[in-house]
Amino acid sequence: MSDILEGRIHSSLGGSYAVITGEGTLACRARGLFRRQGITPLVGDHARVERIAENEGYILEILPRKNALARPPLANLDQLFLLCSTTQPRPSLRLLDTLIALAELSGIEPVVVFTKCDLENGAQYAAIYRAFPCFMISPEENVEPIRAAMAGKTSAFCGNTGVGKSTLLNHIAPELILPVGEISAKLGRGRHTTRHVELYPAAGGWVADTPGFSALEPLEQEALTKENLTQGFREFEPYLSHCKFQDCAHVKDSGCAVIQAVKSGEIPPTRHESYCAIYEELKKKKDWE
């Protein structure tokens, strides 16, 4: 029994991949050529597989990806829901802005979600992220707007542990029954509750629940550089061609249209502060790194 089928990888564990095809789900191993070519199949990949038994097969080819992340290990995402709590733990806007920039440069639409708004109002954050799809939620709040945003798309929900990813997903799709961790009052952070990456059908689309993390890594490590950093800050785009100097880095007020836009209230100051901090970090980065 041998058939060539196309499908999508929906989970991976210990080198075994669950691939959903038009004829059912196959437990697949990757051919040795992937290891020799330095290619790792990712959850979300579209692939050609060879069925060798009723429920078993081999991955023959990974079809072209539109994007891919090393952490969390996912491919072909439409959007990344970036969760940040208004309190417990308090938000790190610098981290959030870094994640947004990496998503933008990876070709993934960032969607900002502030949680725990019942404990602390998040209106000030909504104003900062007005250039993005942005949701402010509490446990009792209607999640229908988020469900609507997920329909027909492949999404991931990411953020530090303790911000409420699993809680929110359980509200959106109760059938998932994802485990929810307790916040450690002593440490001020959450305990990891998600053990592996898997795509689930939810809200008319597909969603990946991912482990808590404090960084987002595209497969291409050079995705974020000081030269392309402005592409990760969409609010800057209307002003980039109006700077006095063509090589303006947008960190000093010397004929910089971006800084002028910050002063006039068109660009939120914290977004520019994050840009400057990330830019200075990237300047220190050696080419070989």
Image: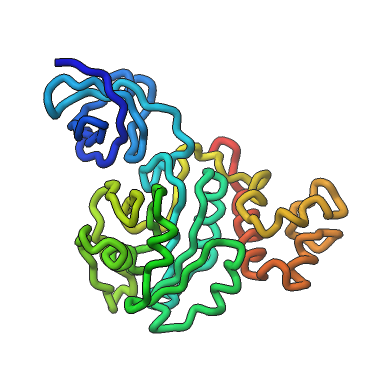
Q: Is residue 36 visible?
A: yes
Left or right, residue 185 beside residue 156? left
Left or right of 271 on screen, residue 214: left
Determine whether 41 is above or below 83 in the image.
above
The location of residue 197, given as percent across then percent down, is: 28, 47
Q: Residue at x 38, y 52 (%)?
A: 156
Residue at 23%, 67% in the rendered image = 181
User: How many labels, in total?
Assistant: 0
Closer to the camera, 78 or 231?
78
The image position of residue 193, as x and y in percent, is: 24, 60
| Residue 125 in the figure: left or right of residue 58 | right
> How did the renderer colour the structure?
rainbow
The image quarter in which residue 22 lies: top left
Place of residue 214 in the rendered image (x, y in percent of width and height, measured from the top left): 41, 58
Q: Is residue 76 above or below residue 147?
A: above
Q: Residue at x 50, y 62 (%)?
A: 96
Residue 49 lies in quadrant: top left
Q: Is residue 28 above or below residue 250?
A: above
* Left or right, residue 247 beside residue 186: right
Pick whichever, 184 or 264, lies toward us: 264
Q: Is residue 283 visible?
A: no
Residue sitting at the far top: 1
Image position, residue 210 (x, y; %): 32, 53
The residue at the point 31 percent across, 64 percent down is 172
Q: Quadrant of the N terminus?
A: top left
Above or below residue 105? Residue 239 is below
